[in-house]
Image: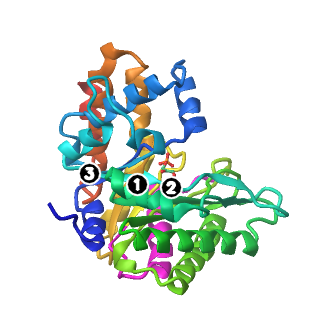
Amino acid sequence: MATPDMETTARGMVAPGKGLLAADESFPTIEKRFKGIGLESTEKTRAAYREMLFSTPGLGEAISGVILFDETIKQKGADGTALIDLLKRQGIIPGIKVDLGAKPLAGFPGEKITEGLDGLRARLNDYRGLGARFTKWRAVITIGAGIPTRTCIEANAHALARYAALSQEAGLVPIVEPEVLMDGDHTIERHYEVSEATFKNVFQALFEHRIVLEQMVLKPNMVLSGKECPQQAGVQQVAEATVRCLRRCVPAAVPGIAFLSGGQSDVAATQHLNAMNQIGALPWQLSFSYGRALQAPSLQAWKGQSANVQAGQQALAHRARCNSAARSGQYTDQLENRWHAA
Ligand code: 13P
């Protein structure tokens, strides 16, 4: 079977009614998540967890693609089936995180730059051989006193563009992820201002590096109040600010935007996506690419025990269904509570 071209893949990733599951936690991040349920992070427990997620019955109805971590794309489940094959069986497109993490930006205290460009061309070819069809690179922008600096935004935009160019060269759709963190006590207005500056810089860099916009997906933060801000913006305000910001920054040639959840609660992430899709008349698909907001209830239900596999899968399927409904603005409290009542 011929591999679909990048434009077809990009459109499939943001297909209506579906979204992406980010399951690409690095070793330190998955260790932190497992600590929350008192589980040690080992090669075996990580494989068991991801096997539980990927073999969720019906997952492909609400999940278009899964972002994997380097270890996972080469890993097998308990019965010897490659984890990537569990996804393909469900018609889910496999992708891979290719950055090597956000590290301190030398000379700029409190700011970060994402590493991983050296040797990336060879790694991309390897991942393509392993079956990946898209890639992800996350840039982190922090809001604080006197930050972000222009230097930090530009350095991260440049790295995102270099990565995206190499990814398209390898025939892999790049997910371009600029995340302006919600950590801090900043207002939603400040988050808007920094997000707009960041996204504009990113698209300028993508243009300069000759990225084909039809063959990529943007994964941005939503525009929110800082976690510690005493004045928390409501669902409608978040939806309107986020849509306004994206309309001003993201060309209509981009097929879709898939938000990260970034530390929002699972229900808040769904409510925000739903309210944005209710605004309507948008030039791109507005979708999700959640990590924590899809996995948290599932991880809690599973607790690392094989007896709880079904409960973990049901929790994931429920969140996936709720977000699927939010893709068309059809998410309701009744849909949310149907699960909790069950
Ligand atoms: P969260 O949705 O938990 O923010 O994770 C998404 C992701 O892929 C971060 O890179």
Q: Are marks 2 and 3 in contact (CB under 8 Å)?
A: no
Which quarter of the figure has residue 307? top left
Q: Quadrant of residue 72?
A: top left
Cα distance in 3D space between marks 2 and 1? 9 Å
Of residues 207 and 258, the one nearer the viewer is 207
- Label 1 to label 3, Cα distance in Å? 28 Å
Q: CA distance from mark 2 to mark 3?
A: 27 Å
* Whether residue 222 is visible: no
The x and y percentages for residue 270 are 38, 49
| Label 2 vs label 3, nearer the camera | 2
The amino acid type found where label 2 is placed reads Val
- Vertical order, 96 against 81 (above or below): below
Which residue is tagged 2? 98
Residue located beneath label 1 in the image: 127
Is residue 79 visible to the viewer in this orientation of the structure? yes
Camera-side mark, 2 or 1:
1
Report whether 76 appears left or right of 208: left
* x and y percentages locating residue 52 in the rendered image: 32, 29
Q: Secondary structure at mark 2?
A: loop
Q: Mark 3 highlights which residue?
A: 324
Residues rendered magenta in the picture: 231-256
Q: Quadrant of the C terminus?
A: top left
Q: Earlier in the sequence, mark 2 or mark 3?
A: 2
Is residue 255 located in the magenta-colored stretch of the structure?
A: yes
Q: In the drawing, what numbered circle is on residue 60?
A: none
Q: Residues within 10 Å of mark 1 (few under 14, many from 20)?
A: many
Rate crowding at label 3 as few (under 14), some (14 to 19) or many (20 or more) other CA atoms within 10 Å.
many
Foreground residue among 330 and 140:
140
User: Where is residue 118 shown, x and y percent of the image?
Assistant: 61, 63
